[in-house]
Image: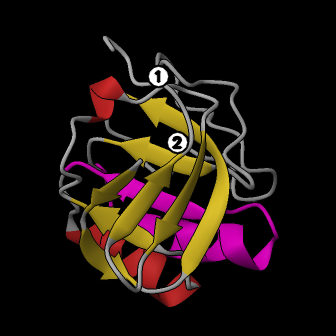
Amino acid sequence: MIFRARVISRGTGRGELLISNEPISFLSGVNPANGIIVESGHPLKGQRITGRVLAFSHGKGSTVGSYVLYALKMNGQAPVAIINEEAEPVVALGAIIAGIPMVDHLDIPLARLKNGTMVTVNGNEGEVQYEGELEGA
């Protein structure tokens, strides 16, 4: 299945989908040295974002979160792509400066997608190729 989306950061990335129904703060919420979500109380606490397609509603927190995304990339710990319901400036800027493909406004709700499914985010064309079953299908 191919879904349409709005391009935020160009490039392509393919990996296993990791979905959060909660916003993510990259500053103090994700360890840039190992790519593990460390935010207390976050549903993905302890999960590693490295090499995965990270899908979440939107970012939250300080503008330093953009630098954390860049640091994740420089440390080899970044997600291969990002999907947001609604991109906000901190995550968008971080994805752009780090060269992480990113899209938002997917034409299907994130709640319909399943964790662990292989997806390809095409930030050049504004497409997400989804290789699995949908929730509620």
Residue located at (33% from left, 66% from top): 103
Q: Residue 55 appears in which quarter of the rendering?
A: top left
Q: Is residue 91 left or right of residue 81?
A: left
Residue located at (46% from left, 59% from top): 82
Residue located at (31% from left, 11% from top): 136
Q: Label 1 sits on what residue type?
A: His
How far separated are the C-alphas under marks 1 and 2? 9 Å
> Does any portion of residue 63 appear in the rendered image?
no
In the picture of the structure, the residue carrying the numbered disc 2 is 29
Residue 22 location, x and y as percent?
Answer: 33, 29
Q: Earlier in the sequence, mark 1 or mark 2?
A: 2
Residue 74 location, x and y as percent?
Answer: 75, 79
Q: Is residue 92 left or right of residue 45?
A: left
Is label 1 in contact with label 2 (beta carbons under 8 Å)?
Answer: yes
Q: Nearer the viewer, residue 10 or 99?
A: 10
Magenta region: 59-85
Q: Is residue 137 left or right of residue 68?
A: left
Residue 46 location, x and y as percent?
Answer: 70, 25
Count neighbours of disc 2 (C-alpha within 10 A) and say few if under 14, some if 14 to 19, many if 20 or more: many
Looking at the rendered image, the quarter that the C terminus falls into is: top left
Q: Label 2 sits on what residue type?
A: Gly
Residue located at (49% from left, 88% from top): 97
In the picture of the structure, the residue carrying the numbered disc 1 is 42
